[in-house]
Image (spheres, rainbow, N blue to C red):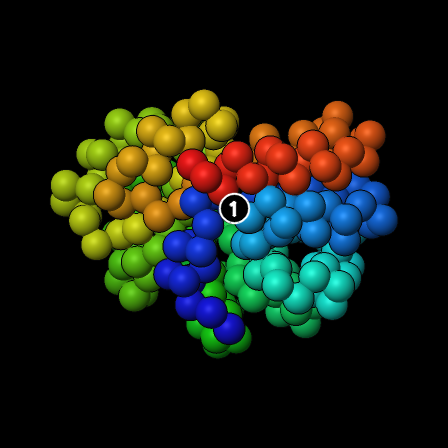
Amino acid sequence: MPSIDKIMTACPVIPVIVIDDIEDAIPLAQALVNGGLKVLEITLRTEQGLEAIRRIKQAVPEAIVGAGTVLTAEDISAAVAAGSAFLVSPGCTAALIDAAQQQQVPLLPGIASPSEAMVLLEKGVCHMKFFPAEAAGGVAMLKSIAGPLPQIKFCPTGGITEAIAPNYLALKNVLCVGGSWMVDKVLLAEKDWAAIEAKARAAAQL
């Protein structure tokens, strides 16, 4: 398994993907990878999430596939069994950290405040998701956190668009951002894989 640092530095943007139609999983993943985004976060918000991870891992081996919206130790076990190379959580609990460390799978836990970040630092965690990024103070908040806690590296997610992503990526404590603009719902419904690939290519060049 690649380390969380290698995963976060592989691409400037990690697509946050919600799969409603399982038949979309493989062509969508291929379009994103062809566009230069090889790290894919498949959220567990739908029943298709785990199966999508399994299928993509088998059919698109160049993709680094992880599970998002991981909330419990049971989610971690299921995601690892499905083949997840990493896990992403909107927040964090001690049980979640312990379970991830026991499974020895990279976890990107979510925080929205310095106090939450300090709790994770005590657990030896230095790579975190900043969520919900825009609602929690955005670029200004991350600049402020960088002063007292420069050792933390972030993947901001939540409300980030193609237009504002460069503002986050310019920060020294940001390794990548999470976003869903390249997985446009209209394009997905139309199964316009070429357009999604083009959006992915633009995101990969940020």
Residue at the image position 33 percent from the left and 29 percent from the top: 167
Image height check: is 117 above or below 122? Answer: above
Residue 69 in view of the camera: no
- Residue under label 1, please give it: 14
| Residue in the foreground of this view, choosing between 16 and 190 | 190
Q: Is residue 169 left or right of residue 97?
A: left
| Residue in the foreground of this view, choosing between 115 and 10 | 10
Q: Amino acid at mark 1?
A: Ile
Image height check: is 71 above or below 134? Answer: below
Image quarter in which the C terminus is found: top left
Residue at the image position 56 percent from the left and 39 percent from the top: 201
Where residue 41 appears, as percent x and y from the top left, is: 59, 50
User: Which structural element holds mark 1?
Assistant: strand
Where residue 140 appears, as percent x and y from the top left, is: 26, 27
Where residue 168 appears, as percent x and y from the top left, is: 34, 34
Residue at the image position 61 percent from the left and 63 percent from the top: 62
Residue that extends furthest to the top in the rendered view of this protein: 163
Residue that extends furthest to the left in the rendered view of this protein: 148
Where residue 42 appears, as percent x and y from the top left, is: 64, 50
Residue at the image position 56 percent from the left and 54 percent from the top: 38
| Residue in the foreground of this view, choosing between 181 and 196 | 196
| Residue in the foreground of this view, choosing between 187 and 72 | 187
Residue 79 in view of the camera: yes
- Count of numbered circles in the view: 1
Q: Quadrant of residue 57?
A: bottom right
> How many other residues sit within 10 Å of disc 1, few (<14), some (14-19) or many (≥20)?
many
Q: Is residue 28 left or right of residue 190?
A: left
